[in-house]
Amino acid sequence: MYASNRGHDSLVIYAADQETGKLSLVGHESTQGIGPRDFTIDPSGALLLVANQDTDTVVAFWIEPDSGLLTATGHVAHVPTPVCLQLVWRLK
């Protein structure tokens, strides 16, 4: 599970126990910007995008499948004041 921390400019990462549902802290990852307003995960579960409202960026992260840890891909889109993300998939 992920949650954004606007004052800390990070995403917090939790793991959920499959039997009890209890959450345990995995770690924090910097959003590489200021004011993470929204984030989304692609349908494959491999990629997370975060919208940093105050630095006008959308930053992409790979999701480590076993731990949920995030690694920046190096891809940053410059978007004026991003506040909401929506992925649209088109089938050919």
Image (tube, helix red, strand yellow):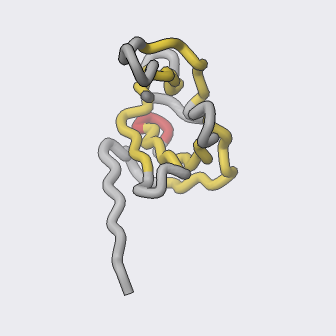
Q: Residue at x 61, y 31 (%)?
A: 67
Label count reads 0
Residue 63 percent coordinates (x, y)? 59, 43
Q: Is residue 58 visible to the viewer in this orientation of the structure?
A: no
Where is residue 47 shown, x and y percent of the image? 53, 51
Asked whether residue 39 is in view, the answer is yes
Quarter of the figure with the C terminus: bottom left
Instruction: Please say if 91 is above or below 53.
Output: below
In terms of depth relative to the viewer, which is nearer, 50 or 92?
92
Direction from residue 14 to residue 37 in the image, left or right: left
The image quadrant that residue 17 belongs to is top left
Q: Is residue 7 above or below residue 90?
A: above
* 85 up-or-down from 33: above or below: below
Residue shown at the point (33%, 66%) measured from the top left = 88
Q: Is residue 33 left or right of residue 35?
A: right
* Residue under the image location 58 percent in, 21 percent down: 28
- Please identify the quarter of the rendering in which residue 53 is found: top left
Which residue lies most toward the bottom here? 92
Check the picture and name the quadrant holding the N terminus.
Answer: top left
**Residue 32 place in picture, x, y as percent:** 60, 35
Q: Position of residue 30 (x, y in %)?
A: 60, 28
Determine whether, in the image, residue 8 is placed left or right of residue 84.
right
Residue at (51% x, 54% y) in the render: 78
Task: Kindly give the residue lying farthest to the front in the view shown.
Answer: 19
